[in-house]
Image (cartoon, helix red, strand yellow):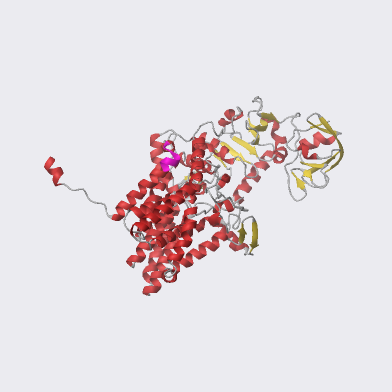
Amino acid sequence: MLLLAKNSTLPKLTRNGRLFLGGALLGVLVFVLVFGVSTLDVTNDAFCRGGYIEKDIQQHYAGWLFYRQSSAGWPLCIARGINYPDGLSVAYTDSIPLVAALLKPVANLVGGTFQHMGWFTLVCFALQGGFGALLAGLFLPGCAAPLAADLLFVTSPVLFERVFRHTSLGAQFFVLAALYFYFAARRKGQYASRGLFALNVLAVGIHPYFLPMTYAITLALLLEYALHNRQLAGPGLYLAANFGGTALLGWALGLLYGSASSGGQALYGYFCMNLNALWNPVGVNGVLYSRVLPAQNQVYGNYDAFAYLGLGVLIALPIAVVLLRRQLGSMLRRHWALAFCCAVLTVFAISNVITANGATLATLPLPASLIKLFSIFRSSGRLFWPIYYLLMLLTLVGLARLKGRCLLAGVALLAVVQVWDVSPGMVQRSAAMQQAMQTDAFPTEMESDFWQAAQQYTAVVSMDEIQDDALHLALFAADNGMTTNDPFAARYDETALAAQRETLLAELAAGTMREDTLYLFAEEGAFLQAVEPVKDNAWCGRVTSTDGTCSWYVIAPGLQRQNFDALCTPYDENYPLRLADYTDALWNRGVLDETKQTVCFADSPFVRRKLEHASVLCADGKEYTIKTIDDHDAGWLMVTLDIPDATVLWDKELESK
């Protein structure tokens, strides 16, 4: 045995193998230092339920829960309980459909709580580091310099803005890998990159936003090869086969299932990239990714186009341009298609709504058909990511002009300055995760004992506009094996949902309820319109969260004789009046701005009864004389009071006498 051990030799890693392994370990190290290992416990889903940074991860997790309990079927990844009765692919809840499909049998076999967001993100960091090191290694010699340069990629502010917040978009390695395979194929004079082919297929199973990025890089490779070699057939067949593979996987994962529109969401031009994005270090929730540069102003949804390069890159980039000044022309000629595709992606990211700092410089008119088409990728600013990483790469290409120790020192200095500058953002993201991992840090907001009784229903339906608390309701429904029509997915069929709501409202108006269904309203006016015919056969009223920030107006069939805690206000003759939460150019939360003496209520039989013989409205022990009541505007009752400023009545429970 000893002789065998002496004579045996382990296979040696190639340089690329050492770079990939070293980069992957670097990515894992950064992940552990920032997020720790608690997220890797599949039985701990506190940060998924509580909402890391914002509520999006609740959407991802709710989609996974609905899919996990759905019966097997084809296509895969259809969560039958969402968008009931039609169902919806969890691709539209950003629940990483390919991973969900692979892990569903494992999760059901293991049983109990099973969250995979932590492990998915760890793998993303490892692959970010691995492909980042390979990409740097194409332009930097040895292993030390590429691994030092890899710190730019594994501490990328764009990466940290996405992981766990928009979990699937943490797969930034798709962009780095696509760039690596592009440059590697160019050096070999090839077009049929197996790596790019695989990326383009797999991207649809992670997040469709990666598709225009990886395909743009692929198209650049094919165009440059085809025109240089005057061969169109091979690249054309390759592209067609790649499209076919992508479409096939997308179909298998349910992306083509049913009809999903952009219901209720912003259109193209809202989530656009501000012209200051490269040097604006402010992320979501005001987190600063710079020790030096101040936050810049932004408008609309510019926050989603976050693209801060980091101080190290911002300093090194002009130096790199100077070092490469004689080669830039030839580089652009050699990679003309890549430059063109990047220009197109940049224009799309900026959009027709051109913003700079806190101002909108211009809004270029576009046909409605194009706006609708472009709204498929309405968060347009994300499509700048290939250019973002190419700018980082350009700094490395420029520094590669240095030689020997000067090169290693230059790259190391760049990495140190970069990490030092962006570290405050990483520290704050680490603190946010520590807070999110505390079970009681983010209450479910559904602590009333009403929700215990409501677990008896098999369906929960949203009867009006998107609920601010839709994701809490989605988790509640998923946990209790209910179906829901609540539009918490990124895409859904708005027309079908409106038709379903009309049917349900017509049933309520006729005094008919579905005994297995819990009816929820976001707007009190809509609730008051619908509740009257069914109030005797259901518990009806308002349920609030403990902190009062969320409220639900409910019709709960069969619970009419039950009493609930102080978080519940039953609908009866003692139910209070409230101003309509209505705001436009003239009205401010139900108060007419011009005089501030006229208030409005959503018209309903209940409000009319309250105001019919009333002479005053009371709030906080004070009485305000009613001067006039105007019902000429259909759907509204406008009341003029003897009051200097009716804004004091905002959010107040009012009584009429």
Which one is in front, 601 or 40?
40
Q: Is residue 284 above or below residue 651?
A: below
- Left or right of 228 in this view: 80: right
Q: Position of residue 102 (x, y in %)?
A: 39, 45
Residue 247 horizontal/vertical position (percent): 44, 57
**From which residue to which does the magenta span run?**
31-37
Residue 606 appears at what percent x and percent y?
77, 35
Residue 113 magenta-highlighted: no
Where, quadrant-wise, is the N terminus in this rendering?
top left
Q: Is residue 167 above or below residue 547?
A: below
Can residue 94 be seen?
no
Left-right relation of 623 to 29: right
Residue 570 position by quadrant = top right
Depicted 265 relative to depicted 111: above or below: below
Where is residue 94 drawn, in percent x and y? Answer: 50, 47
Relative depth, front residue between 590 and 335: 335
For residue 362, above or below residue 20 = below
Residue extending furthest left? Answer: 3
Q: Residue furthest bottom?
A: 230
Magenta-colored segment: predominant secondary structure:
helix
Report the residue at 49% width, 36% height from top.
434
* Residue 85 placement, left or right of 618: left
Does residue 195 appear in the picture of this structure? yes
